[in-house]
Amino acid sequence: TQTVSQSDAHVTVFEGDSVELRCNYSYGGSIYLSWYIQHHGRGLQFLLKYYSGNPVVQGVNGFEAEFSKSDSSFHLRKASVHWSDSAVYFCAVNNAGAKLTFGGGTRLTVRP
Amino acid sequence: DMKVTQMPRYLIKRMGENVLLECGQDMSHETMYWYRQDPGLGLQLIYISYDVDSNSEGDIPKGYRVSRKKREHFSLILDSAKTNQTSVYFCASSFRASGNTLYFGEGSRLIVV
């Protein structure tokens, strides 16, 4: 069984701040780890994915995430947030199969 | 243009009525999904379809059924809707060789009264 935990339900920062959204997973085999963003009233959109290689992966709009096998983590980071980054962020895990398991989401609020 | 389209976007039905939610994608993705999203419960997988007529139950299939007769279309059917099926329903599709990166539709908000 694969599980995904996003420990922070809400994160609030100011525009220009850096932010880290936390994701921890449990799974025994080879996995894909990904992040999705959901703006209010919209569907989820893919941000980035890790499977192997360089543990730091770059995504769209300045987002990056770092995989850590020892910590079972895949935290999402951005160096300088913009008000338009306010959204809910979901971490997800899947093996080679098609079923993704999503975390509960973290709502990011960026204040001007 | 890579797109997942859901119809209708908003729907109000009476308890006991049938509901049809439709989803189309233009990317020839093999795999399609139906999720529901409720406050505090995140995304829950209802059904997954691996290709035409190759459907599999997800985590919460009770009260739902699906149909996939063409690769680009995937329907979710509620026979005799219940008030606890009030939710936002998302369709998604993915390409197996990409490691199943999901493309989501904009959602269908269903209210059952």
Image: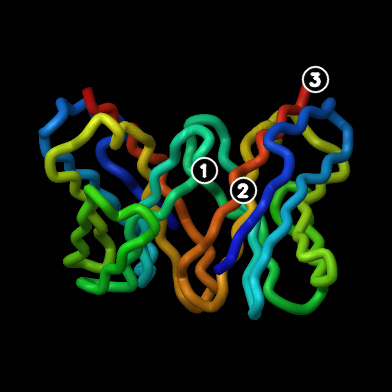
Comparing B85 with B23, the one in front is: B85
Residue A32 image point, x, y percent = 63, 70
- Helix, strand, or loop for circle 3? loop
Chain at numbered mark 1: B
Give the position of the C terminus of chain A as an image quadrant: top right
Residue beneath the point at 58% across and 54% down: A46
Q: Indicate the amino acid at tag 3.
A: Pro
Observer able to see residue A56: no
Tell me, yes or no, whether the two marked residues, 1 and 2, touch with CB atoms within 8 Å: yes
Left/right of residue A36 with respect to residue B93 in the rendered view: right
> Mark 3 or 2 closer to N-term?
2
Left/right of residue A2 with respect to residue B53 in the rendered view: right
Left/right of residue B29 with respect to residue B96 in the rendered view: left
Q: Badge 1 is on which residue?
A: B42
Comparing A93 with A62, the one in front is: A93
Q: Badge 2 is on which residue?
A: A90
Q: Badge 3 is on which residue?
A: A112
Give the position of the N terminus of chain A as an image quadrant: bottom right
CA separation in Å, label 1 and label 2: 9 Å
* Discs 1 and 3 share one subunit: no
Chain at numbered mark 3: A
Tell me, yes or no, whether the two marked residues, 3 and 2, touch with CB atoms within 8 Å: no
CA separation in Å, label 3 and label 2: 23 Å
Give the total of numbered labels.
3
Q: Indicate the amino acid at tag 1.
A: Gly
Residue A54 image point, x, y percent = 82, 74
